[in-house]
Image: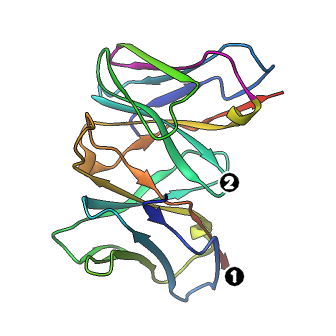
Amino acid sequence: DQQVKQNSPSLSVQEGRISILNCDYTNSMFDYFLWYKKYPAEGPTFLISISSIKDKNEDGRFTVFLNKSAKHLSLHIVPSQPGDSAVYFCAASGKQSGVSARQLTFGSGTQLTVLP
Amino acid sequence: DAGITQSPRHKVTETGTPVTLRCHQTENHRYMYWYRQDPGHGLRLIHYSYGVKDTDKGEVSDGYSVSRSKTEDFLLTLESATSSQTSVYFCAATRRHENGYTFGSGTRLTVV
């Protein structure tokens, strides 16, 4: 049972336009959410995060929105650039009973392609 | 960059043989993790460590064991490799979860 879902395996966007990547979660205990970007043959790199006490966090061209009632978050990239082409993973963390430390639970990823 | 080095970067091994993957970090991070990445599954947690000699199981721990005898090293062992363990393995580390994890470059393991 996937607790973090990214239902779109791929997304293509024209350079300069907005990219919107979506993520849904089911576990109400999650209180911290992160986005990672991954290029081929490299490890994932941290992009941006948001705490459950906020509904928006912005960092340059990247903005993450959190809708707790809908258990949904999204990553907006404006404007999109060809160098943004990568796989984007949504991840969530929470204080869960029975575990020794926080863990990140990842979605299955969305391949973003920004067309020049 | 937390200075995470994974070795080897690539390995091909035969079914039934033991395999050990190494993760080395230079930033004195307390928490370390092993994930595997497979198509359609994203990254799934195998084992993690919250201190020297302190480890626990993740979502897909069957067939794997780990050891952490020093802060900087976290070893993942496949006692008897199977074809289902063909995957890309990533190590990660963090000092504070709010800062996100730093990942190594991965080890591509093929079990034939």
Q: Which residue is mark 2?
A: B39
Return the x and y of residue B14 as percentages of the image width and height: 81, 19
Return the x and y of residue B34 as percentages of the image width and height: 48, 33
Q: Quadrant of residue B57?
A: top left
Position of residue A96 in the picture relative to residue A109 (left or right):
left
Q: Which residue is mark 1?
A: A116
Determine if marks 2 and 1 fall on one subunit: no
Outermost top residue: B69
Q: For the point 24% across and 59% down, which residue is it?
A: A29
Against B67, is A110 above or below?
below
Chain containing mark 2? B
Q: Quadrant of residue A59?
A: bottom left
Q: For the point 26% across and 76% down, which residue is it?
A: A68
Return the x and y of residue B11 as percentages of the image width and height: 74, 25
Tally of numbered discs: 2
Q: Amino acid at mark 1?
A: Pro
Position of residue B79 in the picture relative to residue A61 (left or right):
right
Q: For the point 57% across and 69% down, which residue is it?
A: A84
> Foreground: B95 or A4?
A4
Outermost right residue: B112
Quadrant in which the C terminus of chain A appears: bottom right
Question: Residue B43 shows which numbered tag?
Answer: none
- Crowd rating for badge 2 (residues with CA inside 10 Å; few <14, some 14–19, many 20+): few
Position of residue B7 in the picture relative to residue A63 (left or right):
right
Secondary structure at badge 2 equals loop
Return the x and y of residue B47 as percentages of the image width and height: 44, 31
Q: Which residues are magenta?
A: B70-82
Secondary structure at badge 1 equals loop
Q: For the point 32% across and 28% down, which residue is it?
A: B27
